[in-house]
Image (tube, rainbow, N blue to C red):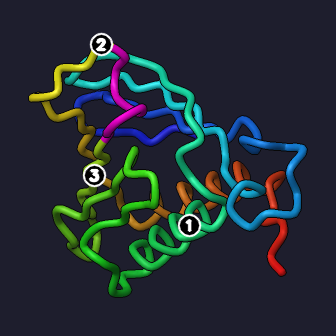
């Protein structure tokens, strides 16, 4: 799926696999996902692959974007156990939402400047947010949560 940002910026987001496909009996290790990102932004262009999200965290993204699309209350930001990605709500108008995608640690360019922020700002209508939700659901469809008990 592709998050479309302001100024023709894009963030391709793809779930490649579980970090440990063979491990199915450990709540955390069974559910880490290898996330591929291809970023084309005002900050530069780069790709990264890292086990940066749990299945439950992708579900939290789906929920956050669903609530945002439906003009329901959401937290100001959505961050995760591994702080590689963060979504920050900058503007929350009923017909247009501005969200900043923040890239940290392994989700930044390989030869990164530690003093520089790596972000992509996006403006989305509720309809576009519903499309994002559908695309995230498709990405996650082949990766159910494992070892829940």
Q: Secondary structure at mark 2?
A: loop
Measure the alpha-carbon separation of dots 3 and 1: 17 Å
Q: Are marks 2 and 1 in contact (CB under 8 Å)?
A: no
Q: Which residue is mark 3?
A: 123
Residue shown at the point (36%, 65%) measured from the top left: 78
56 with respect to 97 (left or right): right
- Quadrant containing the C terminus is bottom right
Q: Which residue is mark 2?
A: 111
Q: Quadrant of residue 36?
A: top right
Q: Name the residue furthest left.
A: 115
33 with respect to 142 (left or right): left
Nearer-N-terminus badge (3/2): 2
Nearer-N-terminus badge (2/1): 1
Q: Quadrant of residue 107?
A: top left
Provide the residue span drawn in magenta.
103-110
Q: Nearer the viewer, residue 124 or 73?
A: 73
Label 2 crowd bin: few (<14), some (14–19), many (20+), radius 10 Å: few
Label 3 crowd bin: few (<14), some (14–19), many (20+), radius 10 Å: some
Measure the alpha-carbon separation of dots 3 and 2: 28 Å
Q: Nearer the viewer, residue 76 or 3?
A: 76
The numbered dot on residue 62 is: 1
The total number of labels drawn is 3
Q: Name the residue furthest top.
A: 111
Residue 106: x, y in percent?
42, 32
In the image, residue 106 lies in the stretch drawn in magenta? yes
């Amino acid at each position: 799926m592709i998050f479309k940002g302001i100024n023709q910026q894009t963030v391709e987001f793809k779930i490649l696999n579980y970090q440990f496909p063979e491990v199915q009996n450990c709540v955390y290790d069974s559910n880490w996902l290898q996330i591929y990102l291809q970023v084309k932004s005002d900050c530069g262009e780069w790709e990264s692959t890292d086990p940066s999200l749990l299945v439950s965290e992708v579900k939290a993204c789906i929920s956050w974007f669903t609530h945002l699309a439906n003009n329901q209350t959401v937290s100001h930001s959505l961050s995760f156990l591994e702080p590689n990605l963060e979504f920050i709500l900058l503007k929350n108008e009923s017909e247009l939402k501005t969200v900043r995608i923040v890239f940290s640690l392994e989700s930044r360019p390989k030869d990164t400047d530690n003093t520089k922020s790596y972000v992509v700002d996006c403006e989305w209508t509720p309809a576009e947010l519903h499309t994002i939700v559908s695309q995230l659901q498709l990405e996650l469809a082949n990766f159910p949560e494992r070892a829940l008990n």
